[in-house]
Each structure stands twice: as C-alpha cells, then as structure tokens.
Image (spheres, helix red, strand yellow):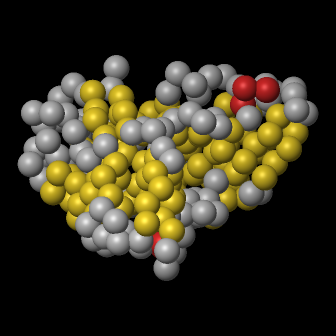
C-alpha cells in the first residue's frame, strides 16, 4: 500500500542553523501539507501546497519557514534559522483531491530537536 | 476560533472493555469531523469521519456520531483489543472550503490482556 515517507526520523541541530525536512508524498496525490506537534501540545497546521504554490498557511508559518517541491517526488520544509521553540515533531501529509472532507495521508514524522 | 477538545489521557483498559473517548468542538458553520489514530512509530491514519449532523462514522469496530446539538463526536468501541493501543486524535475541518485539519491534543489508550 502506498505511504508517505519522511526523512530523517530525528534531526538534532543547533539554534540558528538551517534545517530541511524531507517528505515523499504518495505519487498520484496533488495536495501536500505540513503539521507540527510540540511535545504535550496539539498537532498544528502549518501550510498546504498545491500546483507549486502555497494555498493556505497558519500564523505559525512565518518568514522563517518555506516549502518547496524541488522535483516530481519530494516535498520539503525549510526552517532558515531554527529557534529552541521549533523543537517539535513535524508531520507531512498528502491527499489526492481538495475537498473539506478528504482524507489526508500522514507520514511517520520527523522529530526536530533544537539545542 | 475553531477548536477541538478531547479527554485527557492516558486511558487504561483491560481487553474486551468498553471504550469511550470524549470529543467536543467549537466551529462556525458546518465542520467535517474526523478521528485519526497513531500507532507506535507510525503516522496518523484516518480511523473514521462524518461530514454532516447525525452521520455515524464507523471502522474496525469503532463508531462516532456527529452530534450538532451537543457539538460532540465521541469515539466508542464495544470491546477493545490489545492491538487498539495507540494515540487517538479528534479533528475537524471548519468548512467545506478549507482543508487544514484542526486537532485535539490526542488521547493515549493502553489496553492490557
């Protein structure tokens, strides 16, 4: 069964460094998402992406964040200058269509630790 | 703003016990409601959904009914198994125009034999 994959599973970085989190969505899906979960808190929406541009983003997704689909398979989240409060589990998701009741398929997550 | 509140965990049950995980929501308009489950080491998986009032979503023995009058979407299962041990997330999409899921905090279920 096709699945969303994410790499790395765990990333440790120093404050102020740039990180890139990578995701491979399911191959025929058209909509891509990033969410994050700070330890002990809710899973929060960051951004959605369709047709090579951002379609929605939350207040969390500020200028430090960017997303890209550099080729036909990868979908990346870049954090330009990491802060301690960026430490969280980051989930990528994809879906085949865009409706309000669609299923989003999630990857296993990347745990980001900022020291 | 729109939000989801679910009962705090962890919930610890014996095999074959009845399960209820409470979920209530706040939303304008008519949201779609979801339960996602996360097994250890895996991503979130859709367990069931309901898109309008009085709809019942069901899957793998789990059920939840969309109750607009009480703004609730409680998850139930009549007889849990050890394999149901996981984290359960209640979520909503506020209206048909959006796609961003709004999640509750998650409830950890632990089932022992």
Q: Is residue B31 left or right of residue A75?
A: left
* Res A63 → quadrant: top right
A108, A69: nearer the viewer: A108
Residue at 51 percent of width and 36 percent of height: A42
Q: Is residue B103 left or right of residue B58?
A: right
Residue at 43 percent of width and 48 percent of height: B89
Residue at 36 percent of width and 29 percent of height: B3
Give percent across and percent down for residue B31: 23, 38
* Res A41 → quadrant: top right
B103, B83: nearer the viewer: B83
- Above or below, B40 against A90 in this view is below
Residue B49 showing in the rendered view? no
A42, B6: nearer the viewer: B6
Give percent across and percent down for residue B86: 51, 60
Residue at 36 percent of width and 33 percent of height: B4
Give percent across and percent down for residue B70: 15, 33
- Above or below, A99 against A60 in this view is below
Give percent across and percent down for residue A53: 52, 40
A94, B35: nearer the viewer: B35
User: Seen from this angle, which residue lies furthest bottom?
Assistant: A1
Image quadrant containing the N terminus of chain B: top left
Residue B103 showing in the rendered view? yes
């Amino acid at each position: 069964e096709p699945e969303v994959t994410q790499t790395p599973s765990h990333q440790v970085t120093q404050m102020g460094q740039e990180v890139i989190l990578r995701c491979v969505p399911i191959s025929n899906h058209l909509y891509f998402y990033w969410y994050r979960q700070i330890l002990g808190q809710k899973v929060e929406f960051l951004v959605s992406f369709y047709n090579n541009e951002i379609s929605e983003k939350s207040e969390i997704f500020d200028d430090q964040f960017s997303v890209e689909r550099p080729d036909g398979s990868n979908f990346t989240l870049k954090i330009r200058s990491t802060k301690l409060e960026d430490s969280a589990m980051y989930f990528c998701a994809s879906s085949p269509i865009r409706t309000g009741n669609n299923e989003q398929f999630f990857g296993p997550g990347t745990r980001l630790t900022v020291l | 703003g729109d939000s989801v509140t679910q009962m705090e965990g962890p919930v610890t049950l014996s095999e074959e016990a009845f399960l209820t995980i409470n979920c209530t929501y706040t939303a304008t308009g008519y949201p779609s409601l979801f339960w996602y489950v996360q097994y250890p080491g895996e991503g979130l998986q859709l367990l069931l959904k309901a898109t309008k009032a009085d709809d019942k979503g069901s899957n793998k023995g789990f059920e939840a009914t969309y109750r607009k009058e009480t703004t609730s979407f409680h998850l139930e299962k009549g007889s849990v198994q050890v394999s149901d041990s996981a984290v359960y997330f209640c979520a909503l999409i506020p209206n048909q125009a959006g796609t961003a899921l709004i999640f509750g905090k998650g409830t950890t279920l632990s089932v022992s034999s």
